[in-house]
Amino acid sequence: MKIIVLIGILAIIHNSVAIFRRNLFPSHSAANVRNVGDVGEPLFLTPYIESGRIDEGQKLSQIVGLSSAPNITQYSGFLTVNKKYNSNIFFWYFPALNKDKKAPLLLWLQGGPGGTSLFGLFNEHGPFVLNKDLKATLREYSWNQEFSVVYIDNPVGTGFSFTDNDVGYAKDETDVARDLYEAIQQFLTLFPNERLNDFYITGESYAGKYVPAIAYKIHSEGNASNIQLKGIAI
């Protein structure tokens, strides 16, 4: 009898959690893709980083022309983490709005697995909110008011991050950490001021595996990482 009651309680809890998640993250029908014309070629920043053309890479990666957020400084592009398989990681970076050059840098990783970090950007704590017309408007309170934040689509194959070969996909958390570490190092070379600042790794849900994996990788590299890792948040 106790077993039956316990099973019943677990079923109620499971259903309650499922209902809560459906209300918090409602499902959406496939969106109608709008023809926005030629959006140009993807920006691969690794060649600029490797050749020392840092200023040029920064300038090319800066996003301009967003009329709804003219005062938001932001950068985006691809970092090649495995040339053999052409594996590339996508990032979107927002320096702190308070203009503090010493503001801590937060890395945001989405869960899933397979969830794009742009979910966190647009739905949770980024500077933008997408309205029903898919127009970007400013969020009243965002993390990057006081912190610099970089959103990364992790691992390869998630969101805009991609590879040309199935072998380029991560098989375990060690692979995830390896690719993410390479992306972080390139990012900090492209934005050298951030290498001097405190660094925090954050994420939710399945990123509870990614966050400690990359933190352990950075810690294992010791002083050679030259990353000011101060903590994690899940």
Image: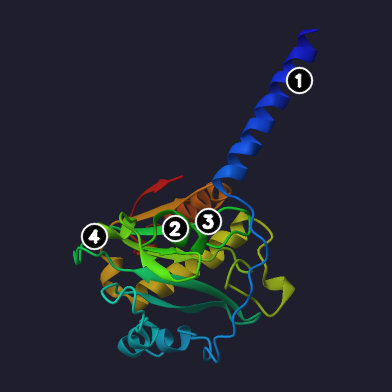
Residue 205 in the image, given as x and y percentages of width and height? 55, 46
* Lateral position of residue 28 relative to residue 8, left or right: left
Q: Is residue 20 above or below residue 121?
A: above
The kind of residue on which mark 2 rests is: Trp
State the residue position of label 4: 103
- The amino acid sitting under disc 4 is Ala
The CA distance from mark 1 to mark 3 is 32 Å
Give the residue type that dot 3 points to.
Answer: Gln
Disc 2 target residue: 108
Mark 1 and mark 4 lie on one chain; the one further toward the N terminus is: 1
Measure how far apart labels 2 and 3 are at the Cα level.
Answer: 7 Å
How far apart are labels 1 and 4 at the CA level? 49 Å
Q: Is residue 136 left or right of residue 23?
A: left
Above or below, 70 against 39 in this view is: above
Tag 3 or tag 4, which sits nearer the N-term?
Answer: 4
Secondary structure under badge 1? helix
Which residue is identified by label 1? 7
Counting residues from the start of the chain, the first of labels 4 and 2 encountered is 4
Q: Dot 1: within a 10 Å radius of its alpha carbon, few (fewer than 14), some, or many (20 or more) residues?
A: few
Give the amino acid type for the residue marked by disc 1 in the picture.
Answer: Ile
Q: CA distance from mark 2 to mark 1?
A: 37 Å
Q: Residue at x 58, y 72 (%)?
A: 161
The x, y position of residue 200, in whole percent, is 36, 53
Q: Where does label 3 land, which residue? A: 110
